[in-house]
Image: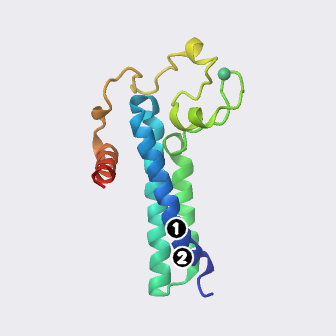
Amino acid sequence: MEHPISSFIVEYFNWVFLGVLALNLFQRRRGKEAHNKRFATLYIAIFVFLIYTFANSIVYFKWSEWLLLPFGVVTLTAGVLLRKWVFPFRFRCPSCEKTLSFEQIIYRDSNFCDDCTPAVEPPAGDEGQSVDSTAEDRDTGIAGRLSRGLSGLFRRR
Ligand SMILES: [Zn+2]
């Protein structure tokens, strides 16, 4: 095959994209509890969509597959630099090291397990992201609007 990696991405990443989007919609139902993680899955979905589009272009225009390399380096670097927002997921409680359940990993912004949650709350809100900021409709900016638009799109079906 001429484009083994790109073809693989073209074949499977649309499902990855839909999976991440579905996750995002489930998080939306939880409201502010999963606020930061909801934005994270949104960013990840955008990334998956970009790489999917890029791989499609490579196959369609018969570009060299080596172009994936600079694309990967740039997006990976951005992901590492912005990891606080792109990947806030932790698999263990930062207080007692207990392994978190799938629910806690996906929905709980604080990353603390059930035992530690009452004790450590509130987890020192960083840079003005006050935990008690009400109503998810406060989401402004592109990400908030995008997320709302996407869930509206799904609801219409
Ligand atoms: Zn704990």
> Residue 28: horizontal and vertical position, in percent?
40, 39
What residue is at 55 percent from the left and 55 percent from the top?
77
Residue at the farthest top position: 119
Residue sticking out furthest to the front: 157
In 3D space, how far apart are the residues under numbered discs 1 and 2 (Cα atoms)?
7 Å
In depth, the one of 73 and 25 nearer the eye is 25
Residue visible at 56% across and 13% down in the picture: 118
In x, y percent, where is residue 19?
A: 50, 55
Residue type at the position of mark 1: Phe
Name the residue: 32% across, 32% down: 136
Residue 131 to residue 152: above or below: above
- Give SS at disc 2: helix
Q: Note whether 14 is above or below 57 in the view shown.
A: above
Q: With respect to residue 100, does 114 lie above or below?
A: above
Task: Please indicate whether residue 113 sits to the left or right of residue 25 in the image.
Answer: right
Q: In this view, does 35 lie to the left or right of 103?
A: left
- Give percent across and percent down for residue 42: 43, 49
* Viewport quadrant of the N terminus: bottom right
> Does the beta carbon at disc 2 come under 8 Å from ligand 1?
no
As drawn, the label of residue 130 is none
x, y (%) of residue 117?
57, 18
- Residue at mark 2: 67
Residue sitting nearer the eye, 147 or 130: 147
Q: Which residue is drawn at 59% across and 74% down?
A: 8
Q: How crowded is mark 1: few (under 14 residues within 10 Å), some or many (20 or more)?
A: some
**Applied colour scheme:** rainbow
Q: Which amino acid lies under the numbered mark 2 shown in the image of this protein?
A: Leu
Tag 1 near tag 2, CB within 8 Å: yes
Q: Residues within 10 Å of mark 2 (few under 14, many from 20)?
A: few
Q: Is residue 48 left or right of residue 142?
A: right
Q: Dividing the image into four equal quarters, which quarter contains ligand 1?
A: top right
Residue 71 marker: 1
